[in-house]
Image (spheres, coloured by chain):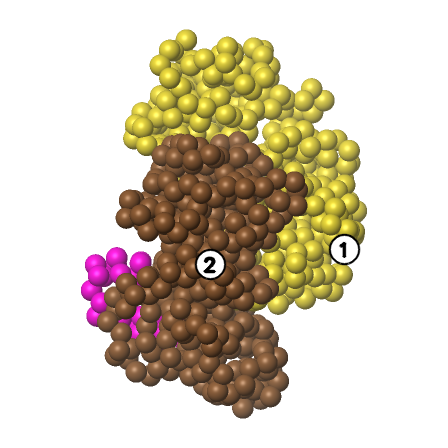
Chain colours: A yellow, B brown
């Protein structure tokens, strides 16, 4: 056990630039397996690379799996974490708790099988198997090595009733239904059962958001999808009262489609990972309503200036991926909503 | 008067990309002075460039005022609006109503002296004087030309008891105190008098935010400024219970300074228009707290991933510049808070 002072956010592991940066912004972390008293060490089983990161690596190496593997190994060896230097993103991991420091506040026990819900881009990581079981052609990376969780971190025990792949897929997007639950419940507490529109409603975070909205008391749910194939997937699930096809980047197209389905929305949830949805979402939302932006393609200034430019009195939330209890809430929604579960399982099957 | 159909949000003025984008997202607007029936034409008197935009231009040209002026002229000539292509932001303007279309719902009359409270980034604008009265070294730009307001827009008549420069300076940032009022009142309604930290507290939006926080029931106000000269300006005003000097870009520096002043904050207001304040603001905010990002330098992904990486249960708001009644609220705060008024007047004097 190391005895120098440690920081709950991991500043003590930052070796370059030392002292100033948080682990996510750091170039290099100390990924040594010896723990500080408030840390937890994980024996790694699987890495799940962030989709944007894997795509960048794969395109850079033109699909050459061996070259992708070599670059991932080189990044981790050099930086002490799996953070793609181009996209800045990481991913998450599954593993087994190997050691728990005596001052760790995370409530984990050696032997627990967990998924880490903080990004790999800030998680100290060493790899010991040369990733020999990975062909470099999939985001899911069988791996051996160790990872470290700081005092202030998030890890969820893997449920025993779901496959790890399914659980991981749910936990990857679990912030969305948790925040939707909070916002819809807040509207309900103010006396109305809100109309909720979800953009990208047939996707992972979108379908969970629809289920969360209904469970939290939404009066009407509107699922927006970009084309008929997605609509055909969403309609039979019954997750949305209305399924409409519209381009979420089209201000008029989106607002007219949502209006025709019973809008404008009191709560609009943006789960579409393309740029340009800020103002369309604002136009589709009622005065006094709330917009939750979950897409990493969201432009802060487009949203801020967009609302002002439309004289729109809307509350706009940055989709924080952390809400206490988010993993359990999402897993329970999956368990309790067969339509969501079958959407996720068909997506898993398609990826396999 | 033009006779083709028009849209209250100005779609009819978008020439590139035609038909798809709203004026704010458009590359080029038709800024021609001939009106559609629901529009208003303004004879321009002064432009007020957004602070982030002016700073970017000034730094790009290393303070060369003539080069800054040339670039502003080029942007307006090319785009039909003053939208900085790097920051995406605009600013606002003062002028006199020249013509009111018969179907305009804004309630304006020819001859009214007004400030437009929608961003220049979406306002059709032509300049006719080459900005010859501007030295390119200040955000306030004496100008001649015409601007157009759409059906759905915001313009405020200039008050008669304040100078136009002072009124404009207040209205330029009036969204901040209005949203701070709403958020603080919401915390108060939930049973606590929140601790409010304002980053950039000696500035325009910062000082008004401090005054708004106190008026709305904040329990303690903390003003954060970057160096002693600003602290010396803020301390005697009494707007903040505590004035602390810290770099808002330093995660540890900021959070420790706010903690020492009685933090963490329940509400953190970011009025510092430099990049990199997202995670520091998160670290300075209590679990369950709210952060309002008013700076156009805010990165959406840095905020979203930053909160997740710190396991921070914080509500993060995109600082919407429009809240109904915002101009009157800010002007009343100025009138009723001599300390705010003197800060604004000394800033005006320094800029003159």
- The quarter of the picture where the N terminus of chain B appears is bottom right
| Residue A242 marker | 1
Residue at image x 33%, y 61%? B347
**Extent of the magenta region:** B54-82
Q: Viewer-proximal residue, A183 or A114?
A: A183
Circle 2 Cα neighbour tier, 10 Å, few/some/many (<14 / 14–19 / ≥20): some
Q: Which element is circle 1 on? A: strand
Q: Main secondary structure of the magenta part?
A: helix
Percent of width and height locating residue B316: 54, 45
Residue at image x 32%, y 72%? B141
Give the labeled residue for mark 2: B337
| Viewer-side label of 2, 1 | 2
The quarter of the picture where residue A252 lies is: bottom right
Tell me which chain the residue with mark 1 is part of: A
A123 over A230 or under it: above or below: above
**Residue at the limit of the structure toward the top, as seen here:** A1
Q: Which element is circle 2 on? A: loop
Percent of width and height locating residue B65: 22, 67
Residue at image x 38%, y 71%? B165
Asked if residue B306 shows in the view, the reply is: no
Percent of width and height locating residue B183: 58, 49
Whether the magenta-drawn stretch holds residue A200 is answered as: no
The quarter of the picture where residue B260 lies is: top left
Whether the magenta-drawn stretch holds residue B69 is answered as: yes
| Residue B133 marker | none
The quarter of the picture where residue B74 lies is: bottom left
Asked if residue A79 shows in the view, the reply is: yes
For residue B190, side relative to residue B202 (left or right): right
Residue at image x 52%, y 73%? B156
A136 over B215 or under it: above or below: above
């Amino acid at each position: 056990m190391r005895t120098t002072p440690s920081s709950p956010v991991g500043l003590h592991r930052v070796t370059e630039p030392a002292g100033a940066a948080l682990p996510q912004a750091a170039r290099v972390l100390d990924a040594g397996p010896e723990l500080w008293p408030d840390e937890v060490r994980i024996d790694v089983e699987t890495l799940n690379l962030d989709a944007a990161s894997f795509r960048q690596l794969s395109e850079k190496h033109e699909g050459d799996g061996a070259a992708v593997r070599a670059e991932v190994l080189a990044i981790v060896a050099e930086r002490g974490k799996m953070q793609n230097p181009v996209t800045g993103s990481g991913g998450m991991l599954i593993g087994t708790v190997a050691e728990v420091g005596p001052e760790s506040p995370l409530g984990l026990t050696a032997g627990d099988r967990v998924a880490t819900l903080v990004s790999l881009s800030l998680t100290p990581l060493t790899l010991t198997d040369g990733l020999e079981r990975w062909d470099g052609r999939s985001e899911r990376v069988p791996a051996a090595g160790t990872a470290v969780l700081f005092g202030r971190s998030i890890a969820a025990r893997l449920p025993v009733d779901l496959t790890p792949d399914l659980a991981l897929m749910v936990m990857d997007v679990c912030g969305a239904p948790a925040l939707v639950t909070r916002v819809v419940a807040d509207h309900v507490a103010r006396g109305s059962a809100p109309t909720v529109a979800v953009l990208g409603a047939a996707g992972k975070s979108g379908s969970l958001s629809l289920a969360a909205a209904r469970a939290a008391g939404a009066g009407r749910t509107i699922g927006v999808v970009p084309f008929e194939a997605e609509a055909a997937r969403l309609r039979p699930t019954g997750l949305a009262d209305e399924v409409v096809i519209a381009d979420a980047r089209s201000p008029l197209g989106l607002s007219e489609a949502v209006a025709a389905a019973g809008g404008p929305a009191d709560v609009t949830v943006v789960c579409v990972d393309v740029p340009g949805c800020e103002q369309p979402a604002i136009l589709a939302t009622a005065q006094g309503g709330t917009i939750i932006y979950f897409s990493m393609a969201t432009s802060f200034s487009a949203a801020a200036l967009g609302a002002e430019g439309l004289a729109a009195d809307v509350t706009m939330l940055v989709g924080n991926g952390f809400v206490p209890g988010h993993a359990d809430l999402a897993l329970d929604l999956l368990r309790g909503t067969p339509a969501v579960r079958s959407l996720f399982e068909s997506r898993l099957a398609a990826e396999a």
